[in-house]
Amino acid sequence: MNRTYGGYIWTDHVFDRMRQRGVSQRKVYETIHHPDVSTEGSDPRSLKYQKFFGDELVEAIVKRDEGKIIVVSCWAKESRRFSERVPLWERGLRWIWNKLRSNKV
């Protein structure tokens, strides 16, 4: 596993969680880089990203510190409930919002 994959900083904790939960580094990266949903985390500097890969929902927690993105934790779960899926229009709006927000930072 690469500690600077995608230009992010990857912690030992996230590597442990990826191994325990069977989540690849590529999926975590894709979840952060192209999320279906992103929300604020419990810490003011943290963000939670979610992305569907078929019936699997991958979630990742990152912190921003002095312009660096630090990948802190991740998990995956099987998700077949229709209500958990994000509608295409909402994903489109979130994508636009994330692009606009990233241009301001």
Image (spheres, rainbow, N blue to C red):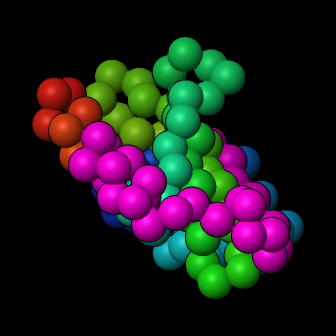
Residue drawn at 35 percent across, 35 percent down: 68
Q: Which part of the image, by quadrant, shows the N terminus?
A: bottom right
In x, y percent, where is residue 51? 56, 63
Q: Point out the residue furthest to the bottom here.
A: 54
Whether residue 4 can be seen here: no
Up/down of 97 relative to 36, above or below: above
Q: Which part of the image, by quadrant, shows the C terminus?
A: top left
Q: Quadrant of residue 91?
A: bottom left
Q: Point out the residue furthest to the left here.
A: 103
In x, y percent, where is residue 24? 62, 76
Q: Nearer the viewer, residue 100 or 90?
A: 90
Q: Point out the residue furthest to the top here.
A: 44
> Does the magenta run of residues contain 23?
no
Q: Nearer the viewer, residue 65 or 55?
A: 55
Up/down of 82 relative to 101, above or below: below
The residues colored magenta run 71-98
> Does the magenta run of residues contain 95?
yes
Q: Nearer the viewer, residue 103 or 82?
A: 82
- For the image shown, how many numbered marks are present on the structure? 0
Q: Quadrant of residue 43?
A: top right
Q: Quadrant of residue 58?
A: bottom right
Give left or right: position of 26 versus 94.
right
In x, y percent, where is residue 13? 72, 48
Residue drawn at 38 percent across, 48 percent down: 94
Whether residue 46 can be seen here: yes
Give left or right: position of 33 versus 63.
left
Residue drawn at 31 percent across, 43 percent down: 98
In x, y percent, where is residue 73? 68, 48
